[in-house]
Image (cartoon, rainbow, N blue to C red):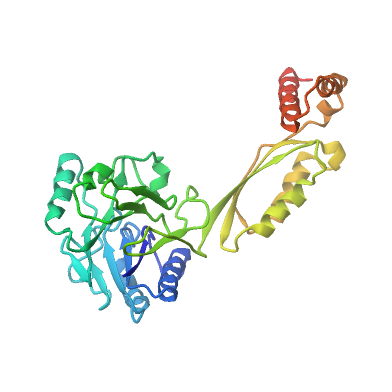
Amino acid sequence: MKLLHTADIHLREDQDERWEALLKVIEVGKHNHIDVLAICGDLFDGGVDAESLRPQIREVFSSTGFKVLIIPGNHDRQVFKASMYFGEDVLILGDTPVEYGDVRVIGLPFEPIHGEQLLKRIRELEAVLTPDKKNVLLCHGELLDAFFSRTDFGPEGEGRYMPFKLSYFEQLEVGYVLAGHFHSKFDVWRLKNGGYFVYSGSPVSITKAETGQRKVNLFEVGDPPGQVLLDTFHFHEVSLELDPFKDEDPIQLVQAYLKRLHPKAALILTVKGYVNSEQLKMTEPDIVARIKETTTGKCAEESYEFKDISGILENDLFKSFTCEAEESGYTAAEDIKGLRDITIRAMMRAGL
């Protein structure tokens, strides 16, 4: 059985980049002839009117050629109701397993539980995850074994969200734990029983903390998880360090980055380092204005931290120190650059 795993789309409407991401996930599923699409929580954003989106949801999930399994996450657990119908090929999965040939899939939707209560809940799954089937568990929560910052989980508040450890799943006959809630990136851990714990990451950037091209998890049950890149909206972070000792035009450097930028990406740009405005024939405000003109419509965020040091570069003390450093036996370019940076910072602090 071929399975596609994603999570954390946070739908709000049917005409934005999140909706486009859902359509792209379905397109990937069709192209790869999958059997099941697993959405492991937070299909909807918190407080969204899911009822108004249901007609469109039913339409995109119809005639796909595959089944769709959805579990509620911490953002949309109040959205799903027993009476809701999302299409004949769609199932809101709980702890009642569904089977496709020799594969059994079971859900562990988000609940506001933790500790012994959560561990007990997971151990109850032992009765249905048995060795006579290839078992797949869908869940939504926070893995404590790995270090995450709070921003890795999307627009969350403080507190833990159904926190579990890899050891909680050791006694289960499970080949895959497919998880949602961790937005930042695709990540995989091996379970002691030989199985896999997988976060797919969000298929679209929800916050600026989710940088880089987004992914989904596509695999044949029995094989390792597999990453597939998506052509969906995402943030791309670039930190550009200007070096006044290189014959480089800051504007041309930015233009070169933009040429390589994915068409669905929004740039988070930081420009730092030093410039020689005398050599460039541009002041600091001129450089910022030219870069902003170059990045119009392509930047989500810009930060300018570079400094003009033309005065220091022409200072006799700096010239003398640079000559001595180059004559003292330092040959590596990074060593000479490091000495220059230290000297520049010291002279800036001294007001020279």
Report the side of 56 relative to 27 (left or right).
left
The foreground one among 317 and 79 is 317
Given residues 326 and 221, the one toward you in this image is: 221
Residue 307 in percent (x, y) is at: 73, 34
Q: Position of residue 21 (x, y in %)?
A: 45, 66
Q: Is residue 30 left or right of residue 231?
A: left
Q: How many marks?
A: 0
Q: Residue furthest bottom?
A: 63
Visible residue check, residue 85 = yes
The residue that appears at 44% across and 49% down in the rendered structure is: 184
- In the rendered image of this protein, does residue 344 appear above or below residue 200? above
The residue depicted at 68 percent of the width and 53 percent of the height is 257
Q: Position of residue 269 (x, y in %)?
A: 62, 47
> Quick check: 158 above or below 45?
above
On screen, 138 above or below 190?
A: below
- Frontmost residue, 207 versus 259: 259
The picture places residue 30, in percent across and down from the top left corner, at 41, 76
Residue 293 visible in the displayed image: no
In the picture, measured across the screen, residue 130 lies left or right of residue 60, that is left
The quadrant of the picture occupied by the N terminus is: bottom left
In this view, 161 is above or below 101:
above
| Quarter that holds the C terminus | top right
Image quadrant of residue 90?
A: bottom left
Q: Residue at x 72, y 31 (%)?
A: 334
Picture residue at 63% right of the left edge, 59% below the top: 297
